[in-house]
Amino acid sequence: MEHTYGKEACQAKLRASRDALEVIQGKWRIPIIVSLTYGNKRFGEIKKDIEDISPKMLSQELKELEMNKLISRTLYDSMPVTVEYALTPLGASLNNLLQELLQWGIHFRSEMTGKEMKVPELAEHD
Amino acid sequence: MEHTYGKEACQAKLRASRDALEVIQGKWRIPIIVSLTYGNKRFGEIKKDIEDISPKMLSQELKELEMNKLISRTLYDSMPVTVEYALTPLGASLNNLLQELLQWGIHFRSEMTGKEMKVPELAEHD
DNA sequence: GTAACTAGTTACCTGATGGAAACTAGTTAC
DNA sequence: GTAACTAGTTTCCATCAGGTAACTAGTTAC
């Protein structure tokens, strides 16, 4: 069958997916955003949420997210100096995408744990 | 305010997001899946869609996607040997996520290009 | 024999990703 | 002075994602 009629549409989608991926790609960005959907947080609080992130990576990724205007950084001149990170409207606009991602993550895990137990004799290759 | 009540929920979401990301992370997996939403395709056809992918990466990522049961591979013993790749139901279940990803990619791009121009009241959005 | 089609594989290389640990800096407490 | 709290930064290092180019293999055509 020809799917040539969908060629430009396909190319447009490929471009859009790349635009989005460029911003949210990486091991830590989505986790950081998920953490911030639970309220504004300080550096140390995000670090507590995402237990295995190093301060270097957290700092680096927060900067990237701030540059892309997904989060905001507010410095409070309180006694030991605190910094609050928050989602911007643009960051918050990831909400639907995040919901789908999380739902699919759960779906995928249940599919895998349910199906991995099944008959392995059909395996064609290893 | 306190977000301690959401602590376990946050951790659950972080786990789900990691599960999902593990599978779809990378430069090429989403593009490959997007390409396959436009119909079953052969190796060379996907390569034509995603112009700058190398045969090595395409082969490698197709294998990963097949292992994770997102796509299927069918060998046809025709004259120059053709192979058809298709989304499995699990791969197709990414549809909602993809839609949100694409929509957000477009939204993000328009936000960025719109705001960089510094004409907020004129460039409302198209 | 050579070339071209199919669908890849292999070897080699580079630059980005990410981790560990030590260090900075300002303030409070002792 | 030392320690502990905040929020990072810096350096050094290893791994890995990804790119390039050449090569395999089976068939058709010349």
Image: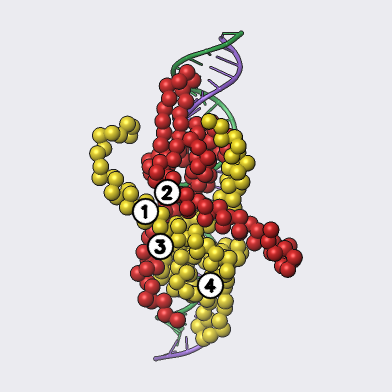
Chain colours: A yellow, B red, C purple, D green
Q: Are marks 2 and 1 in contact (CB under 8 Å)?
A: yes
Q: Numbered disc 4: what chain?
A: A
Q: Nearer the viewer, mark 2 or mark 4?
A: 2
Q: Tag 1, which secondary structure?
A: helix
* Residue A63 in view, yes or no: no
Relative horizontal placement of residue B72, taking residue B43 as reference (left or right): left
Neighbourhood count class around disc 1 (C-alpha, 10 Å): few under 14, some 14–19, many 20 upward: some
- Mark 4 and mark 2 in contact (Cβ < 8 Å)? no
The quadrant holding residue A102 is bottom left
Instruction: Give the number of the disc on residue A107.
Output: 1
The secondary structure type at the circle numbered 4 is: strand
Q: CA distance from mark 1 to mark 3?
A: 15 Å
Q: Which residue is mark 2?
A: B93
Residue closer to the observer: A29 or A102? A102
Viewer-side residue, B93 vs C19: B93
Residue closer to the observer: B98 or C4? B98
**Tag 4: residue type?**
Ala
Q: Residues within 10 Å of mark 2 (few under 14, many from 20)?
A: some
Q: CA distance from mark 4 to mark 3?
A: 17 Å
Task: Measure how far apart labels 2 and 1 are at the Cα level.
Answer: 9 Å
Assess whether mark 3 and mark 1 are in contact (beta carbons under 8 angstroms).
Answer: no
Tag of residue A86: 4
User: Where does residue B18 sit, x and y in percent of width and height?
Assistant: 41, 57
Secondary structure at numbered mark 3: helix
